[in-house]
Image (cartoon, rainbow, N blue to C red):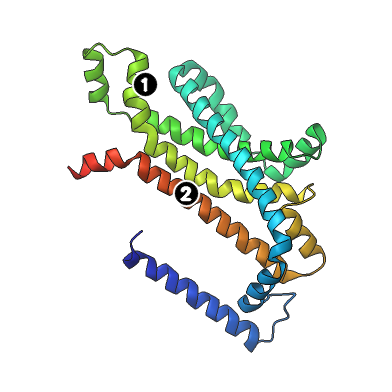
Amino acid sequence: MKFSKMWRPALALLLFIIFWEVATRLFEIESWVLPAPTLIVKEMIEVFPTFMPHIASTVKLVLIGFSFGILAGITTATVLHIFPIMREIVMPFLVISQNIPIIVLAPLFMIWFGLGDFPKILIIVMTAFFPIAIATLDGFGQTDRELMHYMKMMGANRKQIFFKLQLPCAIPSIFSGIKIAATYSVMTGVVAEWLGAQKGIGVFMTLSASSYRTPRVFVAIVVTIVLSLLFFGFFLLLEKLFTRWNREGVEK
């Protein structure tokens, strides 16, 4: 995003923070109800040393779960693309699985798999899996028919068509699904920690809320938002790197 486009949302955010600060002081709102931004920053500086292990725990959990989610999503989409009959059978179950609330699945996973990291990782995998799988399938379906016909005329087999044409053409769609899943995965990891964990941003948030230390709750919220943006930004950079050939072709 160019600076000319960035300054407007940055200005809007700055004005919102100023309004928030002025409103809390003008109406003398108690900090346990709504802390001022300056108080949140002060609290963040104070708790950061003890908060770091919680952040590291959540990041590790999300990285593991999200990595498996990417692998599962792309692999499943590839299999369903290669075998259309399986797609007709499996797709309804995939859609149904996304209508089950995470808040319901999480306690069941805790009962079935214990209170370790595995059930939380499984929840993150399920969250990341669906948007990546659907976006990848859409990407495969958008392959240029004329190019595919041309490759068949040249004697290319299914394997060559898939790896040399369909997969490269699907890369922008794959990254679209990954970027969506990246933001959801951080939030899901925090929510999963609410239901049973020894450390993590979700644990820190729960303990802070139960003791009415609202500034610390906002610290956890801010860190969660920043992590989500960092994840999104990282995969945005990867997308630009992997799709450079496509942009160069369009420019020419």
Number of numbered discs on residues: 2
Which structural element holds mark 1? helix
Q: Nearer the viewer, mark 2 or mark 1?
A: 2
Asked whether 248 or 149 is in front, the reply is 248
Residue 201 in view in this figure: no
Residue extending farthest left: 252
**Residue sitting at x 50%, y 36%:** 132
Q: Position of residue 85 (x, y in %)?
A: 48, 16
Amino acid type, callout 2: Phe
Label 2 sits on residue: 234
Judge whether 203 appears above or below 22 on screen: above
Q: Position of residue 224 (x, y in %)?
A: 61, 57
Which structural element holds mark 2? helix
Residue 188's tag is: none
Q: Position of residue 49 (x, y in %)?
A: 71, 63
Location of residue 119 by image quarter:
top right
